[in-house]
Amino acid sequence: MKSSKTETKPAQSKSPANNGAPQGAAPAKSRFTPVAPQRKNPHGIPDYRLEVPNFKTVEEWVDGKLRYNVTGDFDAPAPDLCESKYLTKDQSIEMYRYMVLNRKMEQALENLFKQQKVIGGVYLGLGQEGCSVASAFALKKEDWVGPMIRNQGSMLVRGFKPSDTMMQYMAKAGAPTKGRDSGSHYGDVHTKNVVAPISHLGDSIPVMAGIALGARYQGKNIACLTFVGDGGQSTGPSYEGFNFACVQRLGVILIMEHNLWAYSTPVELQFACKDLADRSIGYGCPGFIVDGTDPNQVYDVTYEAAQRAYKGEGATLIEAKMMRMRGHAMHDAAAYVPKPYFEYWKRRDCNTRMEKYLLDRGWLTMEQNEKLIADVQKQIDSDRDIADASPFPQPEDAAKGVYLDNSEKVPFKYGPPKVREVKKGTKVGEASNISHYK
């Protein structure tokens, strides 16, 4: 990650409002809507979306087979992106580049899978690059990320190369896990602060809560970002882990990716509530609804959640509504999803809309955009060649690096533990507040 990521300035100190005008000129009026809650849902949860689709899924039996039919207005045009309160011109372009890199990396992975060079399955985040990239982009270097299988963009932001992911899927010796694990199941707890995805959905949440608690014991409040899908959020670890984070006021930022379909099951058959963000009320933490295909919305809401985490104000639940534009994995053709649904969300593609946003603002010219895309493709081609040339691991190396040598000491990340005796009668929750450990 670039050092500029830790120096994000508040809106009043940056210059995007000038829209490319000479210094000292009157700021040009933007036609873009600033990121701000457009409405609140029936339970008072702030909703930042510029549009609220009204679709309904019904079950039908045709020729003895069950199929789903979705009704609603599929012809509505896609809105422009919101205007970020915090992102500068350079940061917006950098974030867009990560999104393009994410998209092209996954296209390369799909081709490698079809060439039978991938060991196992491939899980794509097509259409969700903006959410993965923007949320990770809003954090500081010392913060943590616990991605899931469709959040490979967040791993790029944290400093992993496309070749790392390619080699991981190909089980090569040069992969982060040296060919011992598959897919996106890798991380780096030493320098990049990334916890490898956990296949048991929801289990990353208590892990991130533990990291935030450990940092607090060492005298530091940090933000710990993790993700869960609309299906995974129904699991026990999701509830238990996030409830713990909320009770202890830990800086866990949970993005619930409302993908509309959990594998082959529409959301109407998973849960009775309309908005997953309503669950923040039961947890007792701030909750927000964003358009997951609008990177600016995702960035701003995540950025503000991180600022609260640094102040010791606890966890945040963000519901990002968007469509999973592919099946669960390459083996799933997603034939159960009605085609008009895909067409509707295709017009809301995050990469296309971010590209248009930058071009419309004059932050990128057509020539600069073409060069950016070409440079990304060149990087992808080079990384693919590196991954393809990497050898497979040797059998005798299988047991190396599996167990921690007892002679190796694991250093504290943020400093020695802060210990203070808690007085009798201290209320629950107060004992865990960082002020008690100073």
Image: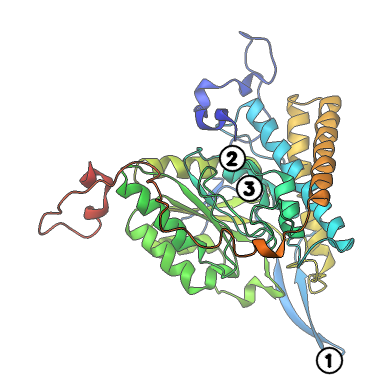
Of callouts 3 and 2, the N-terminal one: 2
Label 3's element? helix
Dot 3 surroundings within 10 Å: few (below 14), some, or many (20 or more)? many
Dot 1 surroundings within 10 Å: few (below 14), some, or many (20 or more)? few
Q: Is residue 406 left or right of residue 88?
A: left
Residue 78 picture location, percent across and down? 76, 47
Give, as a three-letter code, the residue at label 3. Met
Quadrant position of the C terminus in the picture:
top left
Give, as a three-letter code, the residue at label 1. Gly
Give, as a three-letter code, the residue at label 2. Phe
Kindly identify which residue carries mark 2: 137
Kindly identify which residue carries mark 1: 64
Between the residue at mark 3 and the residue at mark 1, the CA separation in whole angstroms equals 44 Å
Q: Which mark is residue 155?
A: 3
Residue in the picture at 85% in, 27% down = 366
- Reply above or below: 265 against 383: below
Residue in the picture at 15% in, 56% down = 426
Dot 2 surroundings within 10 Å: few (below 14), some, or many (20 or more)? many
